[in-house]
């Protein structure tokens, strides 16, 4: 498959989280399997350097730069003639596309067009199964529309698009936007930011942290800071807080802990918004999320007197309980994905809602903070221990109900529903 990208418009140089639309297309193409055999980028009257695409991207793809003149069809048809009979994916360097669309179009067995859900955007993508000459057209959207009207192309609609994103635990319709000016770029930037939040997450991640994350992600993306560096800072704050918690130096401990909690949202957003997600980053991020809570709980217990009272005291038993049921809870949550290849909290709206306040770091941390502030640290710790037990019990009973009673893995009518967009 050959790819042709129209980057002739001056608007093609506008950036979204530090990347031009053309670079975003290239990043999406890098994730295709197999990758395109050839990519032709038409920059019109501009030099390729104006697009600011780093060499680390261009050297990984078979890119040819051209400087065409004339209408869309006058610049596209020579490339089609030179395609060697390959199918051609035609992209617009000013139309920011959902990266899932590139893969969907590339797998099509027929000529396929996709249009922006909001037709006022005047944006489209086009997959030409055969590289026959195209008729005159002012822009890609007009060309795609004429082919659909003529019956030579079919349209990809939301109804035929599987919008579930496993990493985000939610369904999201595809999107396609025209980036014609800085105002449009700013609007789309905010849309992308919010669309990268998970469909089921805790209350603080959803409602409290976003303004801070928004302020941090934009400059980090513009400076091309890799999210793994953010994760490393997060790791340092996580374990740096432990001795302060254990010695009862609560102010420093909580400052570091909340710094880590915010950065835990920043690195994921930065990775997804700038195409810099990696196996190492996922391992570090998810590994940290799994490992650090019980370490913090033990440190909290020592900070309120476990070292003096010992493990045989009520405080010691509460600490043991929270550790045991934390591990048990995590093990229970491993069962559901084996049957459905998705997270437990995507099964229904109820499960997504419960995820907002179950015993997790971002819920337990403010509970314990309030306890310390009001001189009720011990009571807060016992409450957190009880809440962890209740959380594990809910997940256990609910998993049993879904698999043993509903038999949802064998009953099409009881299969998991996509987490709706109105939860976000």
Image (cartoon, grey):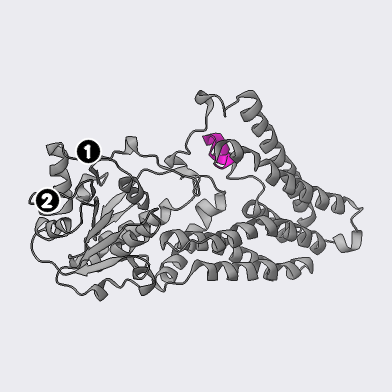
Q: What residue appears at the point 76 percent right and 60 percent down from the top-left corner? A: 300
Q: Under tag 2, what secondary structure?
A: loop
Q: What residue appears at the point 64 percent right and 51 percent down from the top-left corner? A: 363
Q: Where is residue 403 in the image (x, y as percent from the top left)?
A: 63, 29
Q: Does the magenta stretch include residue 396?
A: no
Q: Is the magenta stretch mostly helix, strand or loop?
A: helix
Task: Report whether 316 appears left or right of 326.
Answer: right
Name the disc covering residue 83, or none: none
Residue at numbered disc 1: 154
**Region rendered in magenta:** 342-351
Q: Does the magenta stretch include residue 343?
A: yes
Q: Where is residue 280 in the image (x, y as percent from the top left)?
A: 56, 63
Relative depth, front residue between 350 and 101: 101
Relative depth, front residue between 180 and 98: 98
Residue extending farthest to the front is 84
Q: Under tag 1, what secondary structure?
A: strand
**Image quadrant assignment for residue 316:** bottom right
Task: Report whether 144 appears left or right of 220.
Answer: left
Q: What residue appears at the point 17 percent right and 46 percent down from the top-left corner? A: 144
Q: Looking at the picture, does residue 225 appear above or below residue 290?
A: below
Q: Is residue 249 visible to us here? A: no
Q: Looking at the picture, does residue 50 appear above or below residue 312?
A: below
Task: Report whether 355 appears left or right of 22.
Answer: right
Residue at numbered disc 2: 133
Q: Looking at the picture, does residue 392 appear above or below residue 235?
A: above
Q: Is residue 79 visible to us here? A: yes
Q: Looking at the picture, does residue 145 appear above or below residue 66?
A: above
Relative depth, front residue between 249 and 280: 280
């Amino acid at each position: 498959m050959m790819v042709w990208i129209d980057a002739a418009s001056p608007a093609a140089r506008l950036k979204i989280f530090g990347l031009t639309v053309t670079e975003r297309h290239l990043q999406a193409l890098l994730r295709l399997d197999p990758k395109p055999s050839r990519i032709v980028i038409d920059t019109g009257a501009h030099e390729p350097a104006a697009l600011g695409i780093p060499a680390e991207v261009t050297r990984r793809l078979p890119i040819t730069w051209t400087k065409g003149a004339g209408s869309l069809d006058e610049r596209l048809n020579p490339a089609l003639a030179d395609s060697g009979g390959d199918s051609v994916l035609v992209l617009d360097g000013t139309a920011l596309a959902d990266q899932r669309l590139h893969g969907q179009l590339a797998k099509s067995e027929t000529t396929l067009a996709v249009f922006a859900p909001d037709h006022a955007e005047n944006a489209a993508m086009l997959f030409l199964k055969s590289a026959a000459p195209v008729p005159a057209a002012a822009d890609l959207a007009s060309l795609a529309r004429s082919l659909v009207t003529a019956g030579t192309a079919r349209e990809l609609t939301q109804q035929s698009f599987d919008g579930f994103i496993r990493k985000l635990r939610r369904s999201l319709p595809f999107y396609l936007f025209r980036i014609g000016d800085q105002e449009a770029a700013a609007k789309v930037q905010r849309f992308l930011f919010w669309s990268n939040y998970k469909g089921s997450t805790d209350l603080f991640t959803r409602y409290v942290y976003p303004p801070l994350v928004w302020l941090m992600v934009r400059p980090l993306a513009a400076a091309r800071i890799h999210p793994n560096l953010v994760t490393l800072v997060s790791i340092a704050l996580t374990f740096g807080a432990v001795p302060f918690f254990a010695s009862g130096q609560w102010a420093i401990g909580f400052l570091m802990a909340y710094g880590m909690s915010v950065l835990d949202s920043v690195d994921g957003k930065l990775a997804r918004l700038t195409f810099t997600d990696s196996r190492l980053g996922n391992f570090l991020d998810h590994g940290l999320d799994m490992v650090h809570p019980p370490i913090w709980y033990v440190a909290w217990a020592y900070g309120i007197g476990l070292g003096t009272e010992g493990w045989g005291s009520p405080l010691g038993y509460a600490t043991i309980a929270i550790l045991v049921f934390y591990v048990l809870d995590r093990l229970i949550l491993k069962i559901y994905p084996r049957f459905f290849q998705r997270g437990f909290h995507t099964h229904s709206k109820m499960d997504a809602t419960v995820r907002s306040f179950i015993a997790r770091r971002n819920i337990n941390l403010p509970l314990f903070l309030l306890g310390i502030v009001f001189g009720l640290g011990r009571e807060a710790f016992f409450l957190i221990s009880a809440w962890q037990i209740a959380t594990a019990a809910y997940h256990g009973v609910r998993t049993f109900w879904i698999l043993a009673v509903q038999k949802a893995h064998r009953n099409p009518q009881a299969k998991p529903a996509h987490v709706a967009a109105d939860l976000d």
